[in-house]
Image (spheres, helix red, strand yellow):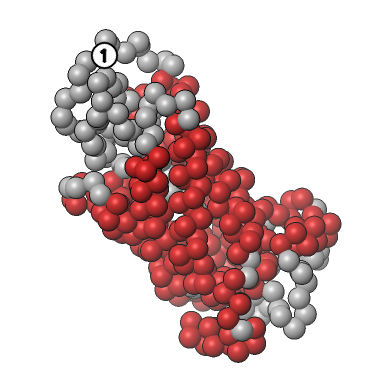
Amino acid sequence: MLARERGSNQDGGGEGRQLEGACSKALNVAEIQPRGRLSKHSGAAGVLVGHPFDTVKVRLQVQCIDKPLYRGTFHCFQSIVRQESLLGLYKGIGSPMMGLTFINAIVFGVQGNAMRLLAKDTPTNQFLAGAAAGAIQCVICCPMELAKTRMQMQGTGEKKSTRKLYKNSLDCLVRIYNREGLRGVNRGMVTTLIRETPAFGFYFWTYDVLTRSLGCDLGDRYMIPKLLFAGGMAGIASWLSTYPVDVIKSRLQADGVGGVNQYSSIADCVRQSVKREGYMVFTRGLTSTLLRAFPVNAATFATVTLVLMYARGEEPAPMDCEPPQPGPHTQIQQQPSSL
């Protein structure tokens, strides 16, 4: 019997697949726990674990090559903690925390309905559904990451910043809107769209292929490690697929923090970056990103599993085992990574 965790957001259950084997008990998530609570807890855990790595990634991506502050990932971690305290690693965390619920609602709603429209549960359809979800959630993701990036760059190297441009993430967006309008709030939208669309597609595709290959049976004692491994590797695959675009996005969104805009367009940013730093510029911060990708997804999967186990303990004992019947079964919901 093969049971796999996959994102879906339909009221009565997701796109099901027939369970195979002699005896099976379907786990109905809709009956034991509201989906919003699962997404909220798992997503928050992922943000808390991964945000320090994200701060290091952004600092390395946008630092000036002429006067670099950091020599590498570990040196960046050390420098931020020494110069700005441990809290320096969590600058800008308010933004992803605020956008978490909205992004989860969009991703699960779009991905679940896309799978229903596609009808057939295949890795290719998982890619298409994930890509659609990734594209639409950019409406929230782009402003959220703009505020996050600006907050992460504020007060670089200062324990107590003498001149703060922004009080918090919300104040950051309000000030940008007042100064530049909607266009300013959506700075980096095109690069965000180019990054998120294939990244979410590769996430769902990789996770689907791995869980099929590993054979995650409910009775398997290694089911949870297998799911954690599949989620972590899916996160790594999704980042690798679009990482160069993320470098350009970060540079465009951080551009103008000091009052001077260095890049006039995406093409100009690519051209200047390659001219000054070579093609290796597209790997800046990659180590931190990959170190972040696996534990973030692992934390997400572990949280969902624990919440489900707790909720399942409140359910009445299951009925006696019956032969499986063809038809849809509700699947365990799982969140894609923040990324």
At label 1, the amino acid type is Cys
Figure quadrant of the N terminus: top left
Looking at the image, residue 134 lies above or below residue 244: above
Badge 1 density bin: few <14, some 14–19, many ≥20, Cα 10 Å:
few
- Left or right: residue 53 versus residue 243 is right
Seen at 35% across and 10% down, the residue is 317
Looking at the image, residue 40 lies above or below residue 272: above
| Picture mark count | 1
**In the rendered image, which quarter is residue 55 located in?**
bottom right
Helix, strand or loop at mark 1: loop
- Residue 8 appears anywhere in the view: yes
Q: Judge by depth and name the residue closer to the eye, 281 or 89.
A: 281
Residue bearing the label numbered 1: 321
Measured from the top left, where is residue 286 in percent x and y? 60, 64
Measured from the top left, where is residue 94 in percent x and y? 59, 52
Seen at 19% across and 52% down, the residue is 118
Measured from the top left, where is residue 24 in percent x and y? 28, 22
Seen at 45% across and 72% down, the residue is 191
Q: Judge by depth and name the residue closer to the eye, 200 or 325.
A: 325
Seen at 55% across and 40% down, the residue is 299
Measured from the top left, where is residue 203 in percent x and y? 41, 54
- Residue 93 appears anywhere in the view: no
- Left or right: residue 218 versus residue 171 is left
**In the rendered image, which quarter is residue 257 located in?**
bottom right
- Judged from this view, the residue extending furthest toward the left is 326
- Judged from this view, the residue extending furthest toward the right is 82
- Left or right: residue 205 versus residue 157 is left
